[in-house]
Amino acid sequence: MMRYCLCLCLSVCFAVVSVSAKSRAQQATGRTFEDYVQQAVHMADAQIAKTPRLCLSDFENRPKWNYTQGLLAHAMLQLYAYTEDTAYLSYVQAYADYFVNSDGTIKTYKAGEYSLDRINAGLFLFDLNRYNPRPEYANAANLLYNQLTSHPRTSEGGYWHKKIYPHQMWLDGLYMAQPFAVRYASEHDADSLYDDVVRQFVIVDRHTRDAKSGLNYHGWDESRTQQWADPQTGCSSQLWGRSIGWYVMALVDVLEQLPDDYAGRNQLVSVLQRVCAGLLKYRDRTTGMWYQVVDAPGRKGNYLESSCSLMFVYAMCKAVRLGYLPESYLQTARQSFDGICRHSVHVQSDGQWSIGDCCAVAGLGGNPYRNGSYEYYVGEPVRDDDPKSVGTFILAAVELARATPHIVVAADGTGDYRTIQEAVNAVPDFRKTRTYIRVKSGVYRERVIIPASKQLLSIIGDGAKSTRLVYGNSAHTIGLSGEEVGTSGSATFYTFADDLYVEGLTIENDAGEVGQAVAAHVSGDRVVFVKCRFIGHQDTLFTYAAGSRQYYKNCYIEGTTDFIFGWSVAVFERCRIHSKRNSYITAASTPQGQRFGYVFHRCSLTADSGVTKCYLGRPWRIYAQTVYVSCNLGAHILPKGWHDWNKPDSHASTYYGEYDNVGAGADQSMRVSWAHRLTPSEASVYTPQIVLSGEDGWNPEIPRAFYRRK
């Protein structure tokens, strides 16, 4: 297990692993990316040491499937994404394997109890199934989602918090169910579910909003029969910190998963902005923390509470990253996190970290009855090392790490460099740890070349629609030699480096329809693009090197002719592939003997208006391999499906296959005779994990975006 040196005092500066100089972000905060990761590691390691079995966390004597264990599991997997330390993965997997049976049923879970808390316990299953796919994990997630399909609701369609709390919605419940529901919708391409997710927030906000503070009360009883409920509004009377914390965490986590073009997004954004603005009014000036009852600082019995403070830090930091709050909130989050470390975090005599000042639990109603008064909230027990503070500490530290890149690129001069190429050049050759480059919103008109020596780079933009890399060379552009640069020399973006991760960036060639004009020329191995846009016409994306393994997830790729072409092994997962004229989508040049070529999995094939005659592919070389699995094929796909490029010899050597596709273009009854209708068994090998595994066992779903040691 990878370990970092323990520090004796939280204010001591950690050892820095960085490029030649600290970025402006690091200079402004005094902490580096690695510092925040170390803090998360210390807290996670202490949790594992104190409670080696995750199922017994939250001071349980018997294994329990509940939201507190689920929160820790989710946090540990987020930390795994930043460290690749398998101890965190193993800790979570042992929890899952104890509870989840081979058929996907869950020990101790009773769907008929209709408790939203049990849904949140399984949020981590989505990530665990990415890192170590097993049918039982997916089946367990299905089981939990099925509870939501019959879960009792208010008259407006809001989920009851639990069956034993009829007609009641609590702020807590938004976090307990909605991050799970939106992940389920995303994983299953169930767009119709997004409206229901957003509806839950709208209903709760309408009934619990306090106009004076801008915050939300803990609960609402539609029946207005509970003692804690106002007889007119049905609302509870106190602004409890952690309930608001769950609420804002749910908001940012759901917003992260909603499709970019989802129409209801702004409703959630406005709620998030209002609540965060309200929180600033009650922040303690000395520590930067918030109180157990948020709007009553200084009132007798009230205290600075760590779990809600960490939740607010996490939500504000993430909201800045997603573009929903201004940068000033990031500085607030950093200062508050440091204040929490000074006030509530301690290093024990054995070197382990500990966090205190956490309200053990609070609720409404029940037996014994909880009346929701101020005295009730401040009178609940306060604990050390409660999972609700441990888990949110890890999440907040990891989010702050992501907000502290090694290098910042900003076209307006507010970063370390104005161009992406300058930032790449600044990274030491053959560096053994990952370098994280943030590219701020803007248009970068330049060619970017990443040589093989710049390994282990993460280049992350502020979103593909606002962070654009653009250049306009074509194959006919005259180079320095006085000759045309050709197709291979026309690209806007080149990478020859292994282990590159790119996210949230548009890569565009705007030469126009002048022939071949490449947007991205990709030759490195183990290369990942997430939420990127590739814009061009002919020959947009050149997967250049034979044997190179490339993974494109949630990307948009558009072009005219052969706009995805080359020799590499490439998987396109949930991408939108958009044709701008009648022509050919792919032109694979798979080498003879290479097991895989192109695999499109759960992609959507769309086209401009008037485009009606497109082929799925044609063979640049006669051993071309291209397969479409579980995709939505638009009406622009021709019934023949495939073209042989006037190479009849390719009929016996190419491998073109389809399985489980839907849409107007998916009918295989008139496909060319030499294309393959895959059987379930044949289709089962076309997963990212199998196609891209290679000799080193690479799993592209195991995160390497931020931190990796060789």
Image (cartoon, rainbow, N blue to C red):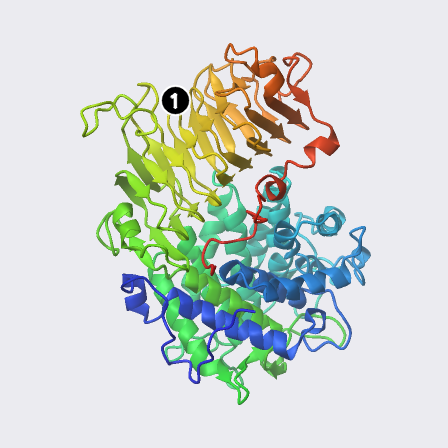
Q: Position of residue 223 (x, y in %)?
A: 71, 58
Asked if 450 appears above or below 291 in the picture, the reply is: above
Q: Quadrant of the N terminus?
A: bottom right
Q: Nearer the viewer, residue 142 or 132?
A: 132
Q: Nearer the viewer, residue 252 or 685?
A: 685
Residue reaching furthest bottom? 349
Number of on-image labels = 1
Which residue, given by chain and number where applicable, does mark 1 sit on? 538
The amino acid beneath tag 1 is Gln
Q: Residue at x 48, y 23 (%)?
A: 587
Q: Residue at x 60, y 61 (%)?
A: 74
Q: Residue at x 42, y 31 (%)?
A: 541
Q: Secondary structure at mark 1?
A: loop
Is residue 247 visible to us here?
A: no
Residue 543 placement: quadrant:
top left
Q: Residue at x 53, y 63 (%)?
A: 79
Q: Position of residue 456 (x, y in %)?
A: 41, 53
Is residue 486 visible to us here?
A: yes
Asked if 553 appears above or below 336 in the picture, the reply is: above
Asked if 176 appears above or below 547 in the picture, the reply is: below
Q: Position of residue 577 (x, y in %)?
A: 50, 28
**Mark 1, other Cα within 10 Å: few <14 / some 14–19 / many ≥20:** many
Q: Position of residue 281 (x, y in %)?
A: 40, 69
Q: Left or right of 46: which side holds 17?
A: left
Q: Left or right of 12: which side holds 189?
A: right
Residue 226 placement: quadrant:
bottom right
Q: Left or right of 422: which side holds 384?
A: right
Q: Nearer the viewer, residue 274 or 564?
A: 564
Q: Nearer the viewer, residue 510 or 681?
A: 681
